Amino acid sequence: MRCFPGLLLISATLLSLLLANSPLGNFYHHLLSDVDIFGNFNLHMIVNDFLMAIFFLAVGLEIKHEVLHGHLCSFKKASFPIIAALGGVIVPAIIFTLFNLGTPFVRGIGVPISTDIAFAVGIFMLLKNKFDPSLKIFLLSLAVVDDLISILVIGVLYSSDINFTYLMIAFILVGLLALMNKRYKVNHIAPYLAVGLVMWLFIYFSGVHATISGVLLALTIPSEAIQGQRESTADRLEHVLSPICNLFILPLFALVNTAIVLSGAMDFKSTSTLVLGTVVGLAVGKPLGIMLFTTVATKLGLTEKPEGATWGSIFSVSLLAGIGFTMSIFVSEIAFSSTPTVINVAKISILAASLISVSVTYMYATVANKFNLSAAYKHKAYTKPTYKNLHL
């Protein structure tokens, strides 16, 4: 059931908000942030620094597969979702900057540029009768490229006080992983995970955000099946990690990171630009950027929209891209790590933008479906896409 991960994320978020605003709220926050579980790592740090590195490993494997074998393996296949993703990143970033230039909140420029794959696809499947089914591949490809850009932003903007000795050791380990793949033809998963764990430690202590280790590890894992095997090492690992991420890591992330005390003292007046930049950037900037860039690129002959799809159906899917949720919350935790009250305001803004995006998507899809504005596929024989479905 493709929509189940999205429903699980919603349930985890509601449970976290309920606990945070109940008589158990103080105990819940104490459990998340003040109780060391392993060394100096509390539950919040384990989820955000370690488990999310596993999530980014899964995302990295997905991106790698799509680039080598899937929907991003040629310019013709990749150009439309890539251009859409660029528009869906650049326009929200500009909107956020216009609201926050000259304020300390401008550091959160990475917050409104992300799309939550699990949540967006979950909503797509819940409303699948109102969407052009062929555009699920477009949404998945768009979200994958979106995640790749978000990963680069995290690595560039949110790394500080870098220890280059530890970072150099981490890159030596990346070189070792590459040798294991290319020179020694190691095709067992365990050695890669073992070296990857050590690499994660050195990247964590280097000051670069540790989740980047997941992407670096993904790049070095063999992606070609050896003789006698139906799947490559990368594909096997991806199949193992996908349910772990969708059913455990992402819901746990939501449970840990959306514990917002709604009755707490939050100064929305002084943070109004942050709120506006986040909400407008996600709910308006995302679909605006996607539609603007793809329309102009199509007019210039740089790309072409998916066969059989109308601009109305593409717009309905672009509205879903405003669901930042997991990735946006993750970036807000990093961007404003020294100011918990600002993090809470950012999270409420992200939740509001996600709710607006879902509501507007539902209303537009309902009206468009009723008046046949985005249902060109009903008049044509629908051919199921041959590309492998993404697992996240």
Image (spheres, rainbow, N blue to C red):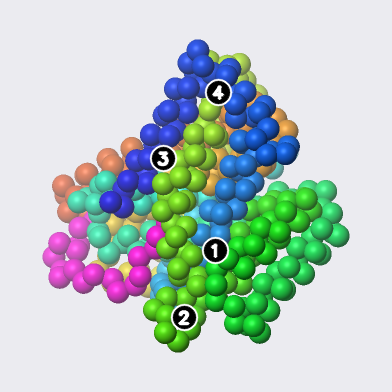
Q: Of the residues under marks 3 and 2, which one precedes in the sequence?
A: 3
* Residue bearing mark 2: 225
* Residue on which disc 4 sits: 28
Gap between marks 1 and 4 measured at Cα = 32 Å
Task: For label 1, count other residues whose C-alpha is less than 10 Å away and answer few (under 14), some (14-19) or many (20+).
Answer: many
Residue 223 at what x, y percent from top left? 51, 76
Which one is closest to the eye, mark 1 or mark 2?
2
Query: Residue at coordinates 60% horizontally, 63% vertically from top-left?
Result: 193
Q: Which secondary structure class fits the magenta region best?
A: loop
Q: Residue 386: where, in percent of width, then height?
A: 30, 74
- Which region shows up in magenta? 374-392
User: Residue type at mark 3?
Assistant: Leu
Q: Is residue 380 magenta?
A: yes
Mark 1 → mark 2, Cα distance in angstroms: 18 Å
Residue highlighted by disc 1 = 60
Closer to us: mark 1 or mark 4?
4
Residue closer to the observer: 294 or 133: 133
Q: How much space separates mark 4 and mark 3, taking CA atoms?
A: 19 Å
Q: Using the numbered discs, state the Cα–Cα distance from disc 3 to disc 2 in whole angstroms.
A: 34 Å
Q: Which residue in the protein does label 3 denote? A: 9
Q: Is residue 96 left or right of residue 366?
A: right
Q: Secondary structure at mark 2?
A: loop
Q: Amino acid at mark 4?
A: Tyr
The secondary structure type at the circle numbered 3 is: helix
